[in-house]
Image (spheres, grey):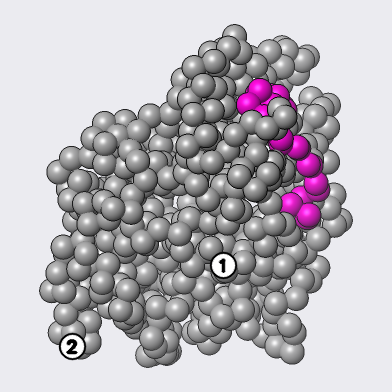
Amino acid sequence: MNRDYFANLQRLGLGLALISASVLWGGFASAEPTHGIAMYGEPALPQDFVSLPYANPDAPKGGRIVLGENGGFDSMNPFILKGQAPRGVSLYTTETLLGRSYDEPFTLYGILAESVETDEARTYVEFTLRDGTRFSDGSPVTVEDVLWSFETLGTLGAPRYAKAYALVSKAEQVGDRKVRFTFSEINRELPLLLGLRPILQKAQWQGKDFEATTMEPPIGSGPYVVDKFEAGRFVSYKKNPDWWGKDLPFYRGQHNLDEIRVEYFGNADVHFEAFKAGDLTSYRETNPAKWLVNYNFPSVSSGDVVKSEIPHHRPSGIDGFVFNTRKPIFADWRVREALIDVFNFEQVNQTLNGSAVPRITSYYGNSDLAGDVANPAQDKVLALLEPFKADLPPGALEGYALPVGNASGANRANLRKANKLLEEAGWTVQDGVLKNAAGEPLAFEILLTNGADDYIAAANIYIEALKQIGVQAKLTTVDQAQFTERTNLYDFDMTQQIVALSLSPGTEQLQYWGSVGVTQPGSRNWAGINSGAVDALVQVMLSSKDRTDFVAAVQALDRVLTTGRYFVPVWYSDIGRIAHAKQLHFPQKLPIYGDWPGFQPEVWWYQE
């Protein structure tokens, strides 16, 4: 347990009693193996549950779905930083010890593991493998595979795996089908995080470089196998007829389709035209204006294509143009505030979305985790922020609201405010160009991917607005591979980033906003956030035993992030929009997460 962790807890007034040695290292408290585990309280479903509540256990089997994605891929190894692999490789072909119910904020039930065991303080977790679990080649899933997978992913895999594994002080086999992980720090989420790690086949990787890109698909124990693919063009996942988990209650009503095929496209227009032509059987529409006007083609009129709207109750997350604060020009919050003022959201929203979607006003909007960022902090949230008062950005305690522009394009009041802030930060207009005392212009590049049409249009509107105050911004578009390489190395000034956030934020928040990501390549902390308050508040979230304390910590974190002015936020939608062939169906009972991983194609089925 590191000193910073103790120090942060002390600053927040939580006391060292939470982390006494008698709790952490005084031996394992008595615990019973259970069929599931929740972050707080008990799992909602009993041990003898029939299926997840949003799955149809009587769904017919067979058929196919054809999806599309923009971009491409050049690897079949999704577990490392190098290369771009299809997201479905891990999602459809590999399996985890536990699986998530998307009808609960954070509850997992046994999959490869028939049971999970931990103590009250969650100083360890023990998994008992289910008898009969097998990889797609017929070989059994063993404890040796589990231990090898955890170590390999934690030490050689992508950075998202490293943080949790670094907190494992001991990993050991404790029975024929039992594995135990002992932890070095308090983090109540760790048993759940480890339960969601993909389990790979050790034998497949013997004598091979795990960190190298490869076009050999992993041998997994999931419902599908990679059947056919052509790099950058398509990949087809076929249902494994001998899949060991087809009768598992957790999976009743899931993975009903025989084939999931994903076609790849160079840009969004070609992608949509392929759907209109019938080459795809499902299409997610992210633009509400297009949803209203672009779906009048014949197959929609005839009823062969159905438009479905899927409501949800998950957080808005953050989406928009992110400042790379590693760059000196964006280090001052006043500069970031000024550039946020220049962005006329109301004009952009009207132009691109017909003003049909709301703006993101905080990272956890649309949920009870958001709190009231626009008004002063109170009660537990205020108490959590007070120790960091001297270092917090303006508005964290007092309240903060985004500027309001004008859909007609007029944004004079905000431009005047922006000019004043920039002047305070040392930037003045010289010969029509905004420069600092050294005569250096305020100029930067906005990096986007080819085919990101809405963001390209928004960026062009933004660039024209910036010219009005003497800021020189230019737009650069690159392919997905170049974009991934540059963002992994933080080689950009400003770019578009979306971070989808759940109702159970935890350790991944350090990957998104933690100070380790300032210098560590490949994190999601593209903004370069370096805040002791952020790091400490995440630790409070991870050590909280009571949900009210947890929510207060998330609300405090939300205020620090929002008032940090790290993004020029755009819009979110509280519904998902999916157009699909009439033969594709989903259950009437929807999960609280709505259209989210675990929904399409997992609980969909095909029926004439």
Quadrant containing the C terminus is: top right
Residue drawn at (33%, 79%) of the image: 2
* Residue that carries the numbered disc 2 in the rendered image: 26
Q: Which quarter of the picture shows residue 348?
A: top right
Q: Which quarter of the picture shows residue 272?
A: top right
Amino acid on which the number 1 mark rests in the picture = Thr
Quadrant containing the N terminus is: bottom left
In screen coordinates, is 459 left or right of 329?
A: right
Q: Which mark is residue 225?
A: none
Can residue 93 be seen in the rendering of this structure?
no
Seen in the picture, residue 293 relative to 2 is either above or below; the reply is: above
* Residue that carries the numbered disc 1 in the rendered image: 519
Q: Which quarter of the picture shows residue 62?
A: top right
Q: Position of residue 299 (x, y in %)?
A: 75, 18
Crowdedness near tag 2: few (<14), some (14–19) or many (≥20) residues, C-alpha within 10 Å: few
In screen coordinates, is 555 left or right of 319?
A: left
What is the C-alpha distance between the residues marked 1 and 2?
37 Å
Q: Which residues are magenta?
A: 457-483
Q: Nearer the viewer, mark 1 or mark 2?
A: 1
Instruction: Identify the secondary structure beneath mark 2.
Output: loop
In screen coordinates, is 10 left or right of 191?
A: left
Amino acid on which the number 2 mark rests in the picture = Gly
Q: Nearer the viewer, residue 456 or 282?
A: 456
Residue drawn at (46%, 63%) of the image: 515
Seen in the picture, residue 383 relative to 373 is either above or below; the reply is: below
Q: Position of residue 526 (x, y in %)?
A: 57, 54
Q: Going from the N terminus, do you reach mark 1 or mark 2 first?
A: 2
Crowdedness near tag 1: few (<14), some (14–19) or many (≥20) residues, C-alpha within 10 Å: some
